[in-house]
Image (spheres, helix red, strand yellow):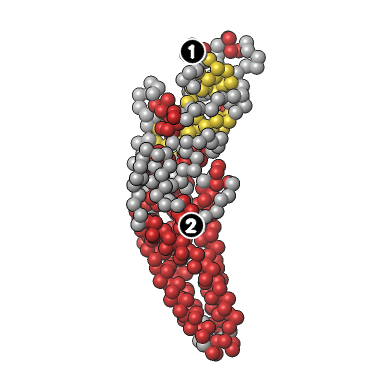
Amino acid sequence: MSCCKYLNDCRRHEKRYSALKIFYAVELLTFIIRFIVICIDLSNKTVRETNATFSAIIFILECIASVPLILSNLVYFCISLCPREVPDKHYLRTYLYPRTCLRFSMVTCFDCKCYHEHPAGIHLTRLAILVVCFCMRFTAFILGALCATKFNPICVPYTVLSSVFLILSLAALLIEMLHFHVFWNFRPFNNESDRLRQRARGFLKYVPYNMIYTERVKLFDITSPELGCQCDSTGLAHTILYHSATLLPKIPLPPVIDGKVIVAYHITTNELAIEISKNGFPLDEHKAVADYIYFTLNAPLAEANDIPTREAIIYVRLCLDHVLQVSNETEFYFNLEIHKKKTPEPKALELMPERRIKVKFPRQIENWIIVFLKDENKDIHPIAYQGLI
């Protein structure tokens, strides 16, 4: 029960972040102890004549599994001592330290194509490496136990110490997995009934407000490879984490053309956002998207609309099909005869010059992610995810 309570406490970023620091500091000390014990075994004349192979393999496995992680942790500890305030906020991209160093400190210094559309892959890479290293440590422990059984008392000290230290490594690995789960499976609710409610087909996830790019850049700007550039990504997670909606008006908005897939925004209240996550966007009696539902190409434009309370922003991926541009509000409806007579009949409307967009069928709304603007979540903080997004 105490272990479960501790893991539950680790849902808060302060506890989780501190626990990982402590475990990895202990990992450094335990590696030094194991390294000394193995070196003593290797230097023993009796060992060299009997089980040199066992000790040599254990030594290699320990070095491969532990040294890279220890070096990366040392780099991270050095980076964590650097100031986190952006020295000049007039620039869109100001780096406090090389991004490569930050990625190395998280053992994620790889550049896979999937990271562009699926940022969670960066964190999954770290978890995969940690699992492989733990398996190598466990293999070394098994070899040590076999050696101790066959050549007692050789390898007995290493086996005993390794059995204890493996428990600490397993605890650190579990917290790392919890660290991944808390963010990428974020739920802004506290009771289980909310957690177990139904989900709409296209609803992907919630993202905490303090993790979107606009908020993270207030602390530091280290993972913004495409801010200010014409990025053709239609990944919702990519848009949320690497692009600032408040800076979009300074960038020319791309033209909306037939058949194009775009990322748009819908501003609403918390209650309606929760309802949309459960049942999808509202439909009319003809199973078409309700006429009062529209999307915008940037968040500030949506902010200016006549909405009583701005509590949630929904990032939506739209497949437009055939688009018709209209110039006034009276034509911004699908059920008008002038639209029905057109060939082909429009499946999306764009109101100019406001650049507001409506889609006709729910299937054109492929998926969406919800961010509550007034979320005061304490389980997640940007500082705990440096180098992982």
Give the number of callouts.
2
Q: Estimate the spatial distance between the alpha carbons at disc 1 and disc 2, rounded to whole Å.
A: 53 Å
Residue at the image point whose x is 43% and y is 60% from the top: 75
Q: Tell me if mark 1 has few (under 14), some (14-19) or many (20+) residues whose alpha carbon lies within 10 angstroms of its own.
A: few
Measured from the top left, where is residue 104 in percent x and y? 48, 57
Q: Which residue is mark 2?
A: 104
Task: Name the spot of residue 347 as percent of width and height, x first.
Answer: 59, 21
Q: Which mark is drawn over residue 376?
A: none
* Residue 141 in view (yes/no): yes
Q: Where is residue 189, by image quadrant?
A: top left
* Amino acid at the residue labelled 1: Asn
Residue 32 in the image: above or below residue 181: below
Tell me: residue 134, above or below residue 47. Answer: above
197 relative position to 82: left or right: right
Q: Which mark is residue 328?
A: 1
Location of residue 223 with respect to 166 vertically, above or below: above
